[in-house]
Image (cartoon, rainbow, N blue to C red):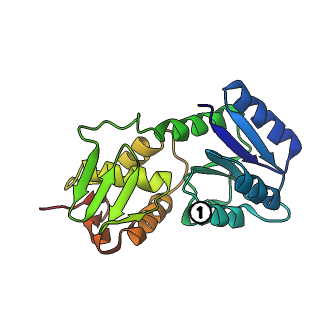
């Protein structure tokens, strides 16, 4: 089934170049030139992934990201200026999964899109079982459903991948570098605050199971389950 990308970018030339790359790669592309158009297109069409510029007229990318996350956990890639590290962190706090700094090469953006869409099917995860469980925390790898005390919680793509990675290596310390290479699989230009933001968001959704994700000072994280 052909995947549909919503490309939200107010720069016409940049949007057209990126659109051509996506179409040539076999994707269907919907376009929006500002935040208001983005919300309208999202609400009236099936969308599998959003590429979202931050600085736009009418409604900025942060507002769009927040609005989308009220209804959907589809992957979101934000486009941000290289110097705006705080913009990137705010995007992650609002639920974005990845970012690309501007100016960028379209083939780099395409690679990020492919990685996120391919990972949706769990094909990139090595597993011996289709479900993970720790007490009343249950994760279905096939359906990507997470249950906390028998209630479903909504995780972003990145939060889900981090949780699965930690649970598959329970009681083992996983460094931030290992998380970056496993989840993003590319040269990383951010800092520890980015990983910390995803972990904080994940913990906030796990309720009384949040304490199972331990921070190991100067090392990384560990999913602790002694049962």
Q: Is residue 65 above or below residue 82?
A: below
Q: Is residue 185 visible?
A: no
Could you tell me which residue is drawn at 73 percent across and 29 percent down? 23
Locate residue 34: give its quadrant: bottom right
Name the foreground residue: 56 vs 3.
Answer: 3
Give the labeled residue for mark 1.
Answer: 69
Toward the left, the furthest residue is: 227
Percent of width and height locating residue 136: 24, 65
Residue 17 picture quarter: top right
116 sits to left or right of 77 = left
Measured as percent of width and height from the top left, residue 213 is found at: 30, 64
**Relative to 216, residue 7 above or below:** above
Position of the C terminus by quadrant: bottom left
Q: What quarter of the picture does the N terminus occupy?
A: top right
The spot of residue 141 in percent (x, y) is 35, 45
Q: Is residue 10 above or below residue 181?
A: below
């Amino acid at each position: 089934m052909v995947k549909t990308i919503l490309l939200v970018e107010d720069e016409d030339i940049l949007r057209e170049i990126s659109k051509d790359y996506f179409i040539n790669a076999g994707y269907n592309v919907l376009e929006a030139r500002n935040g208001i158009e983005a919300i309208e297109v999202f609400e009236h069409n099936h969308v599998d992934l959003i590429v979202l510029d931050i600085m736009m007229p009418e409604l900025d990318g942060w507002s769009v990201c927040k609005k989308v996350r009220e209804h959907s956990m589809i992957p979101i890639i934000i486009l941000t200026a290289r110097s705006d590290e705080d913009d990137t962190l705010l995007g992650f706090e609002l639920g974005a999964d990845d970012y690309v700094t501007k100016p960028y090469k379209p083939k780099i953006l395409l690679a990020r899109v492919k990685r996120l869409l391919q990972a949706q099917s769990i094909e990139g995860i090595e597993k011996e079982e289709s479900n993970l469980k720790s007490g009343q925390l249950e994760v279905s790898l096939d359906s990507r459903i997470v249950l906390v005390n028998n209630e479903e919680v909504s995780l972003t793509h990145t939060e889900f991948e981090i949780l699965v990675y930690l649970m598959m290596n329970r009681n083992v310390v996983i460094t931030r570098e290992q998380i970056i290479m496993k989840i993003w699989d590319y040269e990383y230009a951010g800092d520890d605050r980015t990983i910390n933001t995803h972990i904080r968001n994940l913990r906030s959704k796990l309720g009384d199971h949040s304490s199972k994700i331990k921070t190991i000072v100067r090392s990384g994280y560990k999913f602790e389950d002694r049962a």
